[in-house]
Every structure is written in C-alpha cells, then in structure tokens.
Image: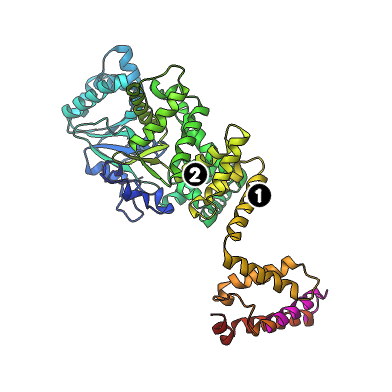
Amino acid sequence: MNILEEIASLQWLEITDLQNLDRKEFDRFGLGEADEKQIPGTQAVETYSKLRVLGKPGVGKTTFLQYLAIGCNQNAFAANQVPIFITLRNFAQESKITNEFSLLNYIRQEFITSGISDPSVIETLLNAGRVLLLLDGMDEVLNQQSNAILNEIRRFSEKYHKNRFVATCRTAAQKLRLRGFTDVEIAPFTLEQIRAFAQKWFMVFSKTSQKDGQAQSVQFIQKLELDENWEFRQLVVTPLFLHLACWVFHGKGKFPTKRTDFYKEGLDLLLGKWDEARGVERDDVYRGFLLSQKLKLFSQIAAATFEQGQYFFEQRIVEQYIGDYIDNLSNVPMDAEELQIESEAALKSIEAQHGLLAERARGIFSFSYLAFLEYFTARKIVASHNLEAFGQALFGLVSHITDPHWREIFLLTATILRSADSLVLLMKQQVDTLVAQDAYLQEFLTWASQKSRSIPTQSKDATLRAFYLALSRTPHIASHFALASSLDQGMFLDAALDDLLIECAIDGSQSFAHIHACGDAMSNILGIVLDVGLHKSLQ
C-alpha cells in the first residue's frame, strides 16, 4: 500500500475550481495526482507513532493492518514489537455485554484465549513500549457507542504512549477525531501495483497450474490497458473492484461486453454485500431504504446534476435532492427542519457506508467514480415510469447528440435498453434535423449525391456517395478537400474513379495483372488528389 499525507476532503476549494476538470481527471481528484508523492504504508507507520489510516470502502484498510501484523510477526517490520489486532466492532459488542469499555481487559482476554494465561505479560509489554496495536474499523462502531470507544482509545494511547498505534477508518467518518493521531489516506493503486495484484490473484485462483495463472494475468493486463477499457482502469484502482474485475475475467477470459453488467455487480457489492459479508451493522438512518429505493435516489441525483453539467455539487444541493426524495417516500408530511436533519443524516450514511458520494473538498461532493455517475444517469433515462415519460427522456438525451460529455450516456443507455431501435431512430432524426439547418452541409451533400449519379457503374449510389464523403474527410489524403463541383480537375478524378470501379467489378481476384490494374487506378486517384495544383485550387 502507498499512503497520501494530504487529505483532499480537508481542503478549502470553490466549486468553480472543480467544474472544469477534464473527464479523465475526475476520478483521480481527491485520490492524489499520478505524480504526487506517495510513501509506502510501512514508512508512514514508522514515521508516526500514532497513525489513523483513512480510505474508501474496499480500498484495503483491514488487509493493510493484517499485512502489518504478519510482517511484524515475521520480523520484516517493527521486529521488536508484538502486534495485537483488534476489530473495534467486536470490542464494542463485547464491551456492551460487560458494560466496561476497557482495551486492557479485552486484550488480556484475547491473550488468555491464545494460551497466554499470565495477566502481567501484556502490561509488561505495554510499559516497555513493545506493542504494535492495530485498531480496525472505527467507522463500523454504532453511533451510540462511538464516543465511549474513542474516549477509551484516547485514554489508552496516552497512558501507554511508548507503543505504536495504527487505526483505520473510512474517509467519510474522519470527523470522529482522535487526539494525538496523524491522519493519512490510502492512495489508489498504481499500474505497477495493479499488475502485481493481478499476477498474484491469477496464480492463486488458477485451477490448473501456476503457469496458466501467469499467462492469464498477462492477458488481463494487456486487455486492461487497451483504450476501450479506460473506464475499467478508473475503477480497478481499489482492491475491491480489482478483485471483481479479476474474477469476471477469470470466468470469461475477457471483460464484459456490457459494462453495465460490471457496474451492476460493483454496485451490489457497495450497496450491501460488502458490509453483510463482514458482519457490519450500520445505524438506522439509512438502513430502512430498500435496494431499489437507493438505486432510484442515486439515479435522480445523477441525472439532475449531469443534465446541468455538474460533476461536482455543493452539500446543500445534494441534501435538497435527498430531502425531496425522502419527502416523496414519507406517508406523513415532514416539516422543513425535520427534513433537513434527515437529509444531512442520510448523506453522512451514504458517504460512510457506500462511498458512492464522496466529499472531494470541504462542503463539495461528487460521485466517487465518473462511471457510476454516468451509469445512474443512463439508468434514470431507461427507468422512466411510463411510455410518455420514457419518450420524453429519450428526446432529452438525443438533444445532446453533439455534446462529447454525453457520449458514454448514449452508449450506456443503448446497452441497458432491451431494444435500442427507438433510440437509434431518434438519433438519426436529430442528425437529419441538424443537417437540414446547415446550408453548407446541404450544398456539400447535394454535390456528393450528384457526383455519385454522374458515374456510369453498377455500384450503388450510396457506395459512391460514401467514397466522396470519405475523401473529403480523410486528412492524410486531402486535408483541405472541400466542394469540388466547379473544378476542372474534378472530371479527371471522376474518370480515375471510374477506371478503378471498372477494375473492381471484374472477377479476377486471383490474377496478379488484375490486382496491378486496380493498384494503378488507385494510384491515379491519389496522384490527382495529392497534386499541389489541386490542393491550391481546393483551398
């Protein structure tokens, strides 16, 4: 693990500083720039005697503490100390039963369970500063117990200050302050770390041989680095999503053709399965929402903000969206103050439990991944409650057909729809409408159509129109090709094209002479198009 010593969500920034971020910069904001100095996790533990490690859900906080414990036991790290790993959730549950919040007594009991019955051993170690105390999951303690747990950690760490302490907590719950502790944040995986993780993952999970596992890990990385899988690369910078990506690839030998399926799997993990698998019980504020209601809420927030071109939004704005949704769900009308309190609590729960909404700077929120913002926006379009609303949603989408920011929304919507025919037809109509309003394009298309009909050939008019349109748009052939209807050279080009089409129509694909004739005809076309005089005329 690498560590970032500067925590983005504690910065003071204006929302205008963030709105102009490039699409590819969105996910990295708040996770550390690629060239920002990162230090190894073990170095951070050696530097600070009291350290609190923050991170999103599934970023590897628990695994990092387990790694420290194993390394310490193997003398690879802090060799003169004894690691003691405590899951704070279990400590809180035990303390509730005994009605005593005492870390010392809890550790004594753990020692007895491990076969060390002498009660003086632990105090001897603590007084000598020989303990590495690892406290996992501050955010997993229920609210009514959190103050008592925090007070006990403060008291214990001050009394036995010679020892080394490392606690973990989700970034969203960082407001649970620990006096004397230094806060750092787990950095996203680098490409080298992704490669190392994938190699180990496939070696372990391969059912045949280590050699096959090694080969599959190489394939995984090669395909992950393709341009078409850019969105996957933005997600797999955390162990949770990287594990999911490896698992999917291991089963299919490729990434899913429908990225929406991968996003759905990831959201299922974040919206419940992750806490369920680890036995974590969260507070009541947000627990009452069904999965379908959570998805609907996120879809509404995503669609409303994306439509306004806002990747980032102020806290009060997102609380208003949440408040409107809660108000619509409630059978009993709520007054404004009560609704405000509920909205604030729900936002805190969403941020702490799922990490889907993240505070990127003080009071400024966004979806933690652009992929999820776009997925939820597309989902809102598809999930319109009736046919009329669905039609309006599609009309609204195609109105953005010339906006590159909406490209992914078009692709995701088409993927989620059972049939994308209606969307594609609307896109065609929108393009036709735009073209009809442009005098230059109308003149250009008329020229291409006339040229295609002026050549006597068996080829379809559409094929010839495509040739002329492509010729006008291909930079390496004719970067300044424009309307050529009034040029003398145009007839030479037509004749050369005619020669080529005649040669292509002859069924002589096995004949060297035929191939040579086709080559000559194409050379004549290129010679005419690339002629300096023609270039000047076209300009």
Residue ID at (65%, 85%): 488
Magenta span covers which residues? 492-512
**Foreground of the two, 61 or 511:** 511
Residue with the mark numbered 1: 425
User: Hey, what amino acid is under mark 1?
Assistant: Leu
Tell me the chief SS of the magenta region: helix
Answer above or below: position of 60 versus 160. below
Label 1 residue SS: helix
Q: Is residue 493 magenta?
A: yes
Residue with the mark numbered 2: 374
User: Hey, what amino acid is under mark 2?
Assistant: Glu
Q: Is residue 366 magenta?
A: no
Answer above or below: position of 100 versus 448. above
Answer above or below: position of 438 versus 92. below
- From the top left corner, tell me how far across and down residue 116 is, in percent: 30, 22
Q: Is residue 205 visible?
A: no
